[in-house]
Image (spheres, rainbow, N blue to C red):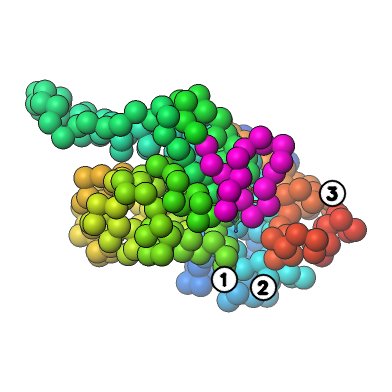
Amino acid sequence: MKIAFFDTKPYDMPGFDHYAAGTDLEIKYFETKLNEDTVSLAAGFDGVCVFVNDTVNETVVNKLYEMGVKVIALRCAGFNNVDTRACFGKIHVFRVPAYSPYAVAEHAMALLLTVNRKTHKAYNRTREFNFSLSGLSGFDLHGKTVGIIGTGKIGQIFADICRGFGMKILAYDKFPNPNTGLDYVDLPELFTKSDIISLHCPLTDETHHLINEESIAMMKQGVVLLNTSRGGLVDTEALIQGIKSGKVRGACLDVYEEEGDLFYEDYSSNVVQDDTLVRLIAMPNVIVTSHQAFLTEEALNNIAETTVDNLVKFFNDVPNPDREVCYHCSRKNDCQKERHKKCF
Ligand code: NAI
């Protein structure tokens, strides 16, 4: 079975080669992302393997289907970049629901500690033998209230980490989980009472621009915002205004709405044309990382193992309902998998 692997980076290949060895999978690695311009590269392949910034819209899906591609294996958890409605009945879609929720939650805390205690600035200062402390003061996390939006795997681990710091936790989830022991509140209460707000919900039509002018207006003066989930959750222009006015004291962004053409590439010798991103990066109280929260050895290993397993199971007709997704999956009580063990 031939698999076209898009948006390949050097750190992807060792794990995939290791787990695919001894299976029927033959992987061809393409550096380019999958999109309308590159989809023809998938001709002659049985499946494609894609990541967060590949564009698998309706046009791409239909082209893949016409070319005989039967499966899309996402090597990530989120699947907002795949038009699952267009795939339905044509191409099966699998993902890696959890590869290391710890990696993402730990990165969120690393960003919070950095923006708060300004270790990024301190590091640069001491390298130039500038031992001044002016402008480096932060605040104790102990005793502060963190609002966690989305209390799935990552949100719960982030809550545990915050508890370890002695923080109070408020939680919001569309489907609250009574087993977490978390104190669930509605969104306005979370916005008004939190010193720090961290996003751990998926990007859907409902959560698009969840952080906007109106929600920022409700927040406490000096709130810190963390987004390690998906860029589209935040209206970036509204965030910039919030930072400029001083309402938002700090922002930690591992994801950015328009990251698709920029993140994972080296533009250090170019003039970046995205003025919004440049503005954010120029702000001293904003930390941007390039969608790297997942990037630990454990996560890369789990991603490769699970993705290869998804493909092997698919081609051997082994049901894999926990990792198959379709547009019904996001609507509770409307799941075909209960009956058929497959999305279609
Ligand atoms: P999960 O599926 O375990 O948890 C998501 C939670 O969000 C669930 O509890 C769900 O009920 C809740 N939710 C769904 N719709 C909601 C809404 N409208 N409002 C509030 N909550 C809602 O997912 P997991 O593994 O915790 O991942 C969370 C997100 O993290 C993913 O959707 C993905 O976008 C992002 N992610 C980012 C990575 C990175 O490298 N930056 C890596 C992996 C995931």
Q: Position of residue 22 (x, y in %)?
A: 72, 37
Mark found first going from the N terminus, 1 or 2: 1
Mark found first going from the N terminus, 3 or 1: 1
Residue 95 in sight here: yes
- What's the amino acid at mark 1? Asn
Residue drawn at x 61%, y 50% as measured from the top left: 173
Left or right side of 122 for 36: right
* Residue 57, label in figure: 1
Would the CB of label 2 be found within 8 Å of ligand 1? Answer: no
Instruction: Count every numbered label the image shows and give the total.
Output: 3
Residue drawn at x 68%, y 52% as measured from the top left: 175
* Residue bearing mark 2: 86
| Residue 161 sits inside the magenta stretch | no
Q: Position of residue 101 (x, y in %)?
A: 58, 37
- Label 3 sits on a secondary structure element that is loop
**Could you say which quadrant of the image residue 42 lies in?**
bottom right
| C-beta proximity under 8 Å, tags 3 and 2 | no
Q: Which-is-in-front pick, marks 3 and 2?
A: 2
The foreground one among 225 and 221 is: 221
- What's the amino acid at mark 3? Val
Q: Which residues are magenta?
A: 169-186
- What's the amino acid at mark 2? Ala
Q: Position of residue 159 (x, y in %)?
A: 54, 35
* Residue 318, label in figure: 3
